Image (cartoon, rainbow, N blue to C red):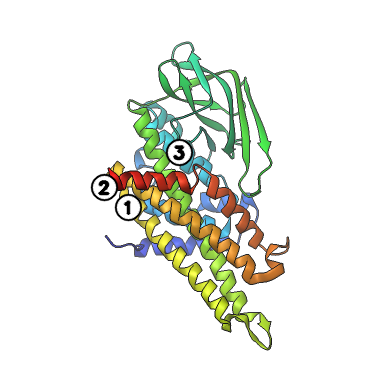
Amino acid sequence: MPLELTVEQRDLESSLRSSLARTSAGEDVWSALLEMGLTEVPFPETYGGAGFTLKDTAVVMAELGRSLGAAPYFSSVILAGFTLLHAGSEAARAQHLPTIADGSVTAALVTGYPFATSTITASVGVGDTIVLDGAQEAVVAGADADLLVVVAEGPSGTELAVIDGDAGGVVRTARESLDFTRPLARIEFTGAVAQRIGGDDLVAGLAKAQAIAITALAAEQVGAARACLEMSVEYAKTRQQFGRAIGSFQSIKHRLTDMLVAIELAEAAVLDAAEADTRSDNELFVAAATARVLASRAATFAAEESVQIHGGIGFTWEHPLHRYFRRAKTSELLFGNTTVHAETVAAALVS
């Protein structure tokens, strides 16, 4: 299997990079994604999508990581959208995915990690409803989402539900985050009536949505790491010390080379994971965990080394590097740290 992008995917990468380079505010980024139809990329045509692949989605996520685009793509399309696609009922997919795909509705996923666990409890409601109680921390873009996709624990096991973000019994509180380009929120439910939408094989569907989510997050981390490397290479070419460019110093060359190697390994793992969903779920789970470990390490390493190469300017408000450092540190802990995912890989090796 070739670990590379197709010509069409390279064109997508180039077009999105050019578009994101012209935007700055979060609204502009979201508008650019909608204009290019990229919110439709991951979903089948049946539900208003473009019918593209996970690999195409990874291309979009990598470019968003490169630019640190502040848009609800990860929360709405990746987390909530793929959870609905793989764990929701047919009726729920038909009702909600078209509006998520066209961007007219933004959604957030309210769950713990693993996705099939939750601090939210569900009790039996009337008809196809359930009543939600409890709170969940660190919900990505949860404060502003139109729709909440909620994993809860009911009397008979795991439940999946949807509820409007402004529904009665829902309190959303924005939380301060190290990475201010990725907003987090606390979502609290008190007797909130939600629509029950779980599919026939809910737990398996949540596991697949989780693997896709961490693959997409790994792609974003690789994109951010590449941006750090590119900034560092350019700085090393132009920054002068002792009458010569710092890029001519052996220690700087070694730092840049180590960054490149870490990023190349992570990118190969991401491309493998983005293809694994076409093979089997078990292969996807292991490949996603592998990509997540390598991408987390590469992103954090690249951000830290870039700050060192840039010296004092690398962690000032005037320079963008501190934003990449913040993103690397928060993403490393989002949905399981490297130890958790390394254990998934280790378990597969000895099984």
Q: Are marks 3 and 1 in contact (CB under 8 Å)?
A: no
The percent position of residue 212, horizontal first and vertical second, equals 40, 44
Mark 2 or mark 3: name the one nearer the start of the chain. 3
Q: How far apart in space, not on screen, are marks 3 and 1 (Cα)? A: 19 Å
Q: Which residue is label 1 attached to?
A: 275
Q: Amino acid at mark 1?
A: Glu
Residue at position x 62%, y 75% from top? 235
Q: Is residue 334 above or below residue 157?
A: below
The quadrant in which the C terminus is found is: top left
The percent position of residue 52, horizontal first and vertical second, equals 36, 50
Q: Is residue 152 above or below residue 209?
A: above
Q: Is residue 299 above or below residue 48?
A: below
Q: Residue furthest top?
A: 126
Mark 3 or mark 1: name the one nearer the start of the chain. 3
Find numbered disc 1 in the image and state the secondary structure of the residue it sits on.
helix
Q: Which residue is label 3 attached to?
A: 81
Residue at position x 66%, y 59% from top? 322
Mark 3 packing: few (<14 Cα in 10 Å), some, or many (20+)? many
- Foreground label between 2 and 3: 2
Q: How far apart in space, not on screen, are marks 2 and 1 (Cα)? A: 7 Å
Image quadrant where residue 7 sits: bottom left
Q: Amino acid at mark 3?
A: Gly
The quadrant in which the N terminus is found is: bottom left
**Residue 224 seen anywhere in this rendered image of the structure:** no
Q: Are marks 2 and 1 in contact (CB under 8 Å)?
A: yes
Residue 279 — which label?
2
The number of callouts visible is 3
Q: Amino acid at mark 2?
A: Arg
The percent position of residue 221, horizontal first and vertical second, equals 50, 55
